[in-house]
Image (cartoon, grey):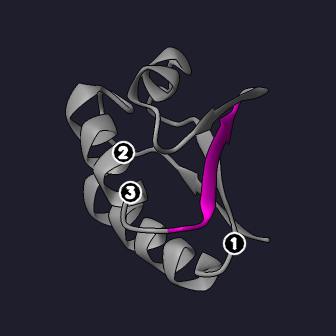
Amino acid sequence: MKSFSYVIKDEIGIHARPAGLLVKEAKNFESTITLECKGKKAAAGRLMAIMGMGVKTGDEVTVSAEGADEDAAIAAFQKFFEENL
């Protein structure tokens, strides 16, 4: 399992547009990708679960990937978070 932590810089947090893009990105990988923030966990492929986490600016999110392509998944998600959140 690989993981990284990221502090959200987007002034709105994880809202509908980036959450939708995040779900789309997750579908490119076989690995199980999860997000964790403030004691809540959500699968990266489930839009409503991500939205339900209520991630705001300044919150630290831990992204984990486990599976055959976990290295590629983590690299892609690190890039995604830096560019979009």
Q: Are marks 3 and 2 in contact (CB under 8 Å)?
A: yes
SS category of the residue bearing label 3? loop
Residues shaded magenta: 30-37
Task: Locate residue 63 relative to residue 12 in the image: left or right.
Answer: right
Tell me the CA gap for discs 2 and 1. Answer: 17 Å
The local secondary structure at tag 2 comes to: helix
Q: Which mark is residue 27?
A: 3
Tell us which disc is closer to us: 2 or 1.
1
* Residue type, label 3: Lys
Dot 2 corresponds to which residue? 23
Q: Nearer the viewer, residue 84 or 52?
A: 52
Secondary structure mainly formed by the magenta segment: strand
Identify which residue, 49 or 38, lies in the foreground: 49
Callout 3 crowding tier (Cα within 10 Å): few <14, some 14–19, many ≥20: few
Mark 2 is on which residue type? Answer: Val
Direction from residue 62 to residue 39 in the image, left or right: right
